[in-house]
Image (tube, rainbow, N blue to C red):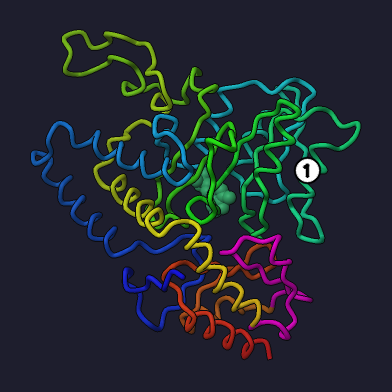
Amino acid sequence: MLASQRHLFEMPRDICYLSSASYSPLPLKTLEAGCAAVGRKGAPWTLDAGFANRQHERARAAAAALIHADPADVALIPSVSYGVATAAKLFAIARGARVIVLEDDHSSPVLEWRMRAEAEGFTVDTVRRPDDGDWTSAVLAAIERPGAPPVGLASISSVHWSDGGLIDVDAVAAVLKRQGAVFLIDATQSAGVLTMDVSRLDPDFVIFPTYKWLLGPYGRAFMYLAKRHQGGVPLEQTAAGRRNVRAENEVYFTDLRYVADARRFDMGERDHFISMEMAAIGMEMMAEWGALAVAQRLALLTERIAEGVRGIGFSIADRRLRAPHILSLSFAQAMPQGLIEGLASEGIYVTARLGRLRVAPHVFNDEADVDRFVAALARRLR
Ligand SMILES: Cc1ncc(COP(=O)(O)O)c(C=O)c1O
């Protein structure tokens, strides 16, 4: 069993941070690398010609490893919404078809399709949050609803950000394939914690940022694109995306053909001296621990909380329906006012999400943290 990794973070003992589904702290190693990198940007003459390329290829490889992808199939992007906008330029949804999204899914995998639906003649079919918490069955039923128009695309999270509901992407991929539909997975809340093997799953797109579960900075995200989509036009037109547009050339625009792989979709200013390396470090740490070990450790903590709050009057989804690292506590009535703020005043950080309490431990948390949270919650609800 993976032990708590608290010693790798700058985290005072009286801080009980249970909010990594919002944003995680940076490991000490990342903080140090970030400080060194700021200094490097202050002295750019110290950088050799191959520096930038080494940085983005290191980050690309680290991201690819988390989903068992070939690094050549992964693009460097700044956000999930950027990735979804990129995907939207690469294929057309048939007129009359449906796009499947989840109720109250994060805006990034949803709004692009809502914005396009009317003009492009498709509908957005929103899968309602199931009362029994079984998102997978609800999504499968929506895709296969008798008499409904064909599905052109499912653009969904692999773990629902608000309630930690788990979506079995293997089962969803299988039914989508039968309809010839495109599958875009927002893996923000799962990459690094839940195993994903794109070489077996064969989704069309998988997108995730680093600032939550991957212990990285804001502004760094990654996009896997299946090879069948790599011939399209990127969101931005950059020199790096073309075969030979180089400032060092005598003729600047020498070869305007796009590079052959997912690198054509890399964002502008990918030569980021500071946060690219910071992103790589967190992803490498997660890979070193391994998703199975991380998930096992976090399941132990969320189960301990679930057990501890039993009897206080919360309802919690069945264990097999929720992610191992996000626990959503539903109140019988409304959440008491000031609860989140009160806990924060004691150094205990959890979040209110859509009327529920979301608890999201990470590798730096330990049993003392969760016991403290449970005791404080019980005391405040008495
Ligand atoms: C499921 C999900 N997708 C995406 C994001 C972030 O999207 P973006 O990178 O576009 O800001 C979040 C942040 O909370 C999220 O929970």
The quarter of the displayed image where residue 177 is located: top right
- Residue beneath the point at 18% across and 54% down: 36
Q: Is residue 358 left or right of residue 250?
A: right
54 is higher (above) or lower (below) than 211: above
Disc 1 secondary structure class: helix
User: What residue sits right under mark 1 in the picture?
Assistant: 140
157 is higher (above) or lower (below) than 264: below
- Residue beneath the point at 86% across and 37% down: 145
Which amino acid, by three-letter code, is at mark 1?
Leu
Residue extending furthest toward the right: 147
Residue extending furthest toward the left: 45
16 is higher (above) or lower (below) than 271: below
Magenta stretch: includes residue 314: yes
Q: Which residues are magenta?
A: 308-335
Q: Observer-nearest residue: 336 or 159? A: 159
The quarter of the displayed image where residue 201 is located: top right
Q: Observer-nearest residue: 277 or 119? A: 277
The quarter of the displayed image where residue 119 is located: top right
Q: Is residue 331 left or right of residue 282?
A: right
The percent coordinates of residue 300 (x first, y second) are 55, 73
- Residue beneath the point at 76% across and 20% down: 95
Position of the C terminus by quadrant: bottom right
Q: Observer-nearest residue: 316 or 381? A: 316
